[in-house]
Each structure stands twice: as structure tokens, then as C-alpha cells.
Amino acid sequence: MRQLPLYQCHKKVWALKIAAIETVEHGCICSNPNLPRADCDSCGSAEHRQSLEGAEITPADPGFAPFRVTVGYVEKHKPQVGGYFVQYADGYKSFSPAQVFEEGYTLIS
């Protein structure tokens, strides 16, 4: 049997190491307080009504505030403390276990 082709990653991503994860029963994931109030009980945006459950991730990196992710993100990616919240250039958000991330990425800024 032939060995599969070997690839090396060269993507640039934004990422934060996760220090804590707390389940959020209700609350909008919106981090923009300037949105007009309309339908969503938390931020007023109708587009966020479907995202009213999920988790709050606390970054291990100093200077970054906790942020919320949807229940869909949690169910799909199953983030864990010690791993990395990852965002790609196209806006896609993912999770990477620490060892996999640290072996594949080097901090550039």
C-alpha cells in the first residue's frame, strides 16, 4: 500500500487559548452594544434571536474579555479548556485541541 500524500499547513488564523467554559442558558452572543433594539431581549437584534443559548469562553490570554459562542458551535466543535478557539479569515469559527494547534501554528503577532 502506498503512503498518502503529505501536506503542510500554511494558513493564518486568529486564536485564543481557552481558560474556562461556562454554559449560558439565555443571552445573546452579540458583542456589539450599538445595535438597535428590536426583537432580541439582550441586544435588540432580530437576527440573534436564534442564538440565545451556548457558552461563554474565557480566554487564557491576558487582555481579552470572555465572549459567547452559540449552542451550535458547542455541539459541533465540543470545545475544551486548554484548547484553542480558532477563527479563519473567512469568519469560520472552530476549535483545536492544544497539542494539535501548538504543533501546527506559530504566533506571528
Image (cartoon, grey):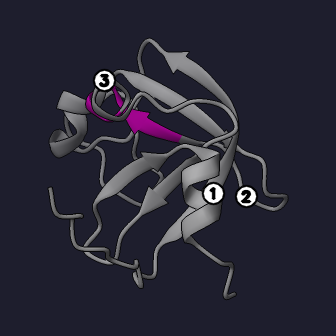
Relative depth, front residue between 44 and 57: 57
CA gap, disc 2 to disc 1? 9 Å
Q: Which residue is mark 3?
A: 75
Q: Which mark is residue 48?
A: none
Residue 64 marker: 2
Q: Residue furthest top?
A: 25
- The percent position of residue 102, horizontal first and vertical second, equals 65, 61
In the drawing, does residue 34 fall left or right of residue 82? left
Secondary structure found at label 2: loop
Is residue 62 shown left or right of residue 91? right
Residue situated in front as seen by the camera: 47 or 85: 85
Q: Disc 1 marks which residue?
A: 16
Q: Residue at x 41, y 63 (%)?
A: 87
Q: Is residue 105 left or right of residue 73?
A: right
Q: Which residues are magenta?
A: 68-73
The image shows residue 57, relative to residue 86, as above or below, that is: above
The amino acid type of the residue labelled 2 equals Phe
Separation of marks 3 and 2 at Cα, in angstroms: 24 Å
Comes first in the chain, label 2 or label 1: 1
Pick the quarter of the image with the N terminus.
bottom left
- Look at the numbered discs 1 and 3 and tell me whether their residues touch, using CB distance below 8 Å: no
The answer to whether 73 is drawn above or below residue 93 in the figure is above
Q: Secondary structure at mark 3?
A: helix
Q: Amino acid at mark 1?
A: Leu
Q: Residues within 10 Å of mark 1 (few under 14, many from 20)?
A: some
